[in-house]
Amino acid sequence: MQTKFDKLSATNAHLTVEVIEEDYKKQVDSKIKEYSKTAQVKGFRPGHVPVQYIKNIYGKGILIDEVIKIASDAVNKCIAENNIRVVGEPLPQEDAYKIDWTKQKEYTFVYEVGFASDFTVDVEKLPTITEYEIEPSEEQLEQSITDVKSRFGNETEGEEAEIGDIIFGTLKQESSEFLFQSGIPTDKVVEASQYMFKGLEKGSSIKFDIQSIFASVKELGFATGKSDEEAASLNGEFEFTVEKITRMQPSELNQELFDKVLGPGKATNEEEFRAQVKEIIKSNYNRESEFLLDFDIDKSLLDNTQIDLPEEFLKKWLLEINDGKATVEDIDREFEAIKRGLKLDLIKTEIAKQNDIKVVYADVLEEVKSEIRGYFGGQGGFDGMEDFIENMAKKQLEDKSNDNSKKYFEKAFGRKVIGFLKEKIKTDKKQVLVDQFNEIATEKYKV
C-alpha cells in the first residue's frame, strides 16, 4: 500500500491511497472463513457452510468493506504522522468509488483534503485587554440582600406545596416500568402546569403528560435522570408521588444571617453587612465582566493569529455532511461564524498542546454539576442536595450513546484554556457603573 500527499496550496491537498491485493487478501479470506463458521444457510449445517459458497454470496461485500477500511485507516495515519491540521473531513473525489469490484485487484482512491495553514500563537505578545470592574447601584444592593435572605433562609418541610418549593418524590410510568427518585423545582414547571403541583401534600400523587411539564428538554432530563436525547423521547402519562416538600423561609437580617453569608464574626451590624454584600455583588456582577473578557480574549486571539482556511473546500464539505438539510445560501449566511469557531478551536488546541493543558473527568463532571445547580435556582445548600446533584450529573455522563460527554468535555476544555490565558494576558482594569458597562458590552458584541 502506498500513500501520496500532494500539497496544492497552503490549505488544500490531494491524498492518494493505492491498495494492492496483498494489503487486503489475508483479511478478506479470514473474514470469509469466519462467515462460513457462523452463517445460517438453509441446506447446510451450522458451521459447515462451504467457504466457496460464502465467497460467492458475501465475498464482494466483504472485499469492499475491507478495502475501504484499509484506505480510511491509511488516510488517518497519513494525517496523524504529518501533523496536518485538518478541517472538516477528507472528501473522496466523485469518481473514487467507480470501481469494478469483480475484476479489479488494485484500487486507487484520491481524497480532497482541507487544512489550516501553518500558524503560531505567542500568548506573551498579545496586546493589553481592558478588564471592567462593575459598580452596583443601591437598588441592586437592596435586591441582592432580599435574594440573600431567601437563599440563606431556613429549610422547612412544607405541608402543602407552593410555587417556589422543591418537591421530592417518585416519578414512574407503569407502561414502560420507568422509576426514578426525582426532584422537581415547582418554579421550573411551565406556568400552564403549575396549578397541578400547588397544594400537593406528602403522599399525594398526580398524573400528567411528561412533555407538558417543563419548558426545555434539559430541565426534563434533570427531573427524570435522562440525557437530553433520552428525555426528548419520553412520552405518555407519568405519575409523581410526593415524599418531601422543601421550602426555604427568608431569614431575618440578624447576626445568624451575617455569619451564614460572610462567615463567623465578619460583620457585627447591618452597616458592615451591607458593605460586604456590596463587594460580593460587585464580584457577582463581574461575571458579566468575565464574559466580556472571555469575548475580548477570543477576539484578540483571532486578530493576532494569522490562519488561512480552505474556504471552498469547507463549503463543499458542509453541504455534503448536511445532506440536503442546508442550502448553499444557508451555508454562506453562517460561514463567517463557522470560520470564527474553527479558527478559535485550532488556536486553543495549539495553546493546550504547547502548555500541556489537559481535561480530566472531574473537570467534566463539574461542568454538569454547575448546570444542574442553576436548574435548582441556588437552593443547593441544604442537607443531601450536593449528593443529589452529583448523582444526577454522573447519570448525565453515563450514556455513551449520546453527545453529552463530548459537549461537557468541550466546555471544560474551553474553560481550562481561557483560565490559563487570563493568567498570561496583560489586562488594564477600569471601573464603570452597570449602565456604562452594558453600553460597552452591547457595542462590543455587535462586532
Image (cartoon, rainbow, N blue to C red):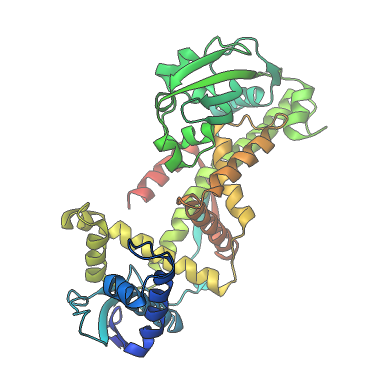
Q: Inspect this view and state whether residue 2 appears.
A: no
Vertical arrangement, residue 204 with respect to residue 349, above or below: above
Q: Inspect this view and state whether residue 206 appears.
A: yes
Q: Quadrant of residue 310?
A: bottom left
In the picture, measured across the screen, residue 316 lies left or right of residue 260, that is left
Q: Position of residue 426 (x, y in %)?
A: 55, 63
- The answer to which of 349 and 275 lies nearer the viewer is 349
In the picture, measured across the screen, residue 246 lies left or right of residue 54, that is right
In the picture, measured across the screen, residue 155 lies left or right of residue 177, that is right
Q: Position of residue 108 (x, y in %)?
A: 25, 85
Q: Classify the position of the N terminus by image quarter.
A: bottom left
Vertical arrangement, residue 153 with respect to residue 297, above or below: above
Seen as rendered, the residue at the extreme right is 265
Vertical arrangement, residue 401 with respect to residue 392, above or below: below
In the picture, measured across the screen, residue 307 lies left or right of residue 164, that is left
Q: Position of residue 403 (x, y in %)?
A: 45, 52
- The answer to which of 277 and 98 lies nearer the viewer is 98
Residue at 69%, 22% in the rendered image: 153
Q: Quadrant of residue 156?
A: top right
> How many numbered markers are drawn?
0
Residue at 65%, 32% in the rendered image: 380
- The answer to which of 394 and 249 lies nearer the viewer is 394
Q: Quadrant of residue 271?
A: top right
Residue at 47%, 32% in the rendered image: 220
- The answer to which of 321 and 188 lies nearer the viewer is 321
Q: Position of residue 55 (x, y in %)?
A: 31, 75
